[in-house]
Image (tube, helix red, strand yellow):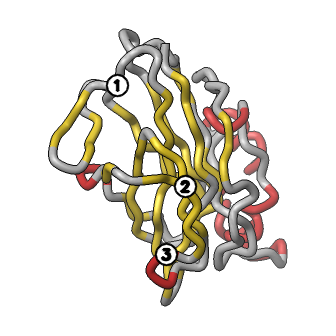
Amino acid sequence: MLAERIAAYENTDYVSEIEQDGAADWIESSGLTVEECALIQPAYGGPCGGFALSIHSHELCSPAVRNSTGLPAVLNSCGVVTVSSNPVGIPINWLPPNSTGLLLNSLNINFVAHPAGSQGNLCLGAPIGRYTGNVFTTDPFGSTVNIALDLTQTPTPGRVVSILAGETWYFQCWFRDRASSNLPNAIGIAFQ
């Protein structure tokens, strides 16, 4: 039975990742699209999955402007805030399909409505670092992108720095949304 095979081998996979024979046919016969199934599927273990810790971060510009999925994209933070541990991830949920984007950072906050004609709002203040080595593209179903941060290789305009204990860094991403662009909420992480 299809449900038993999925439960045994791909129980916490998202709809777009399920590879069991017959899954695509079942989705098609349900009257829903793959995208609609993905919208109603739960997030396993919260924004970080079942095996990572969620970091307490404070949100800025939340809720964000809705994107072409009908939902606002959402930044979260996962891992450990101790800089010597260095495992920090930034999952970005509810991104549009086939969207390209990049993560931004800053030690400062600001508010710029619709920068460069974007639908969203920029909540970071200058100077702003860009993770150009981590440019992402979502799959045809959109959904989630996870960006792993190396706290010893944090881009700023002009040089790469290490995040230090006691600093609060702010993160936001900028992504393509059809013929325009958009931004999700921003988050601030106080590192120890």
Give coordinates of residue 63: x percent, y percent: 75, 58
Establish if 186 lies above or below 189. Answer: below
- The amino acid type found where label 3 is placed reads Pro
Distance, label 3 to label 2, CA atoms, is 12 Å
Q: Name the residue under label 2.
A: 110
Residue closer to the observer: 100 or 62: 62
Establish if 84 lies above or below 130. Answer: above
Left/right of residue 156 with respect to residue 75 in the rendered view: left
Give coordinates of residue 10: x percent, y percent: 62, 40
Left/right of residue 5 with respect to residue 166 in the rendered view: right
Q: Mark 1 points at which residue?
A: 163
Q: Which residue, as the protein is rendered here, is positioned at the far bottom?
A: 179
Element type at marker 1?
Answer: loop
Q: Which comes sooner in the sequence, label 1 or label 3?
A: 3
Q: Do the residues labelled 3 and 2 touch (CB within 8 Å)?
A: no
Element type at marker 3?
Answer: helix
Q: Which comes sooner in the sequence, label 1 or label 2?
A: 2
- The amino acid type found where label 2 is placed reads Asn
Establish if 33 lies above or below 169. Answer: below
Q: Mark 3 points at which residue?
A: 115
Element type at marker 2?
Answer: strand
Q: Tell me the residue at 49%/12% (across/down).
A: 192
Q: Which comes sooner in the sequence, label 3 or label 2?
A: 2
Q: How many labels does the image show?
A: 3
Q: Tell me the residue at 63%/54% (across/down).
A: 185
Left/right of residue 37 with respect to residue 94 in the rendered view: right
Q: Tell me the residue at 57%/37% (across/down).
A: 188
- The amino acid type found where label 1 is placed reads Ile
Nearer the observer, disc 1 or disc 2? 2
